[in-house]
Image (cartoon, helix red, strand yellow):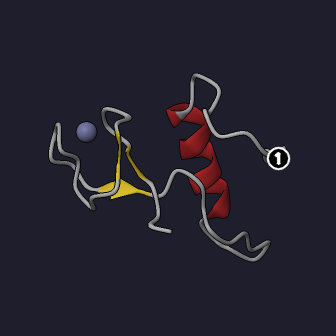
Amino acid sequence: MPAMRKCRTCLTYTFSESCPKCGNPTGTPHPARFSPHDPYGKYRRALLALDAPAPEKTPGPTSE
Ligand SMILES: [Zn+2]
């Protein structure tokens, strides 16, 4: 299963590593792994919170 990626600029979902709309690099909307020792975890979660003004389409448990 290919990993769905998301443009952090225009919030477009894509499978490409670059956004088909704006050309900015994309990232994974959901980190594949969660590490309590991830030094960048809090920054990534903060970014995700900012990037997700609407509920995600995918059902499932969400981080607190
Ligand atoms: Zn984009």
- Does residue 49 lie above or below 43 as drawn? above
Residue 61 appears left or right of 45: right
Residue 15 appears left or right of 40: left
- Does residue 22 lie above or below 26 as drawn? above
Residue 33 placed where, x, y %?
A: 68, 72
Q: Residue at x 59, y 22 (%)?
A: 54
Residue count near mark 1 (Cα–Cα under 10 Å), binned few <14, some 14–19, many ≥20: few
Asked whether 1 or 52 is in front, the reply is: 1
Residue 41 placed where, x, y %?
A: 65, 62
Asked whether 14 or 64 is in front, the reply is: 14
Farthest residue, direction front: 1
Q: Residue at x 62, y 33 (%)?
A: 56
Three-letter residue code for mark 1: Pro
Residue 44 placed where, x, y %?
A: 57, 55
- Does residue 52 lie above or below 61 as drawn? above
**Which quadrant would residue 9 be assigned to in this image?**
top left
Residue 22 appears left or right of 29: left
The picture quadrant for ligand 1 comes to top left
Residue 34 placed where, x, y %?
A: 72, 69
The C terminus, quarter of image: top right
Mark 1, residue position? 61
Q: Residue at x 79, y 48 (%)?
A: 63
Name the secondary structure under disc 1. Answer: loop
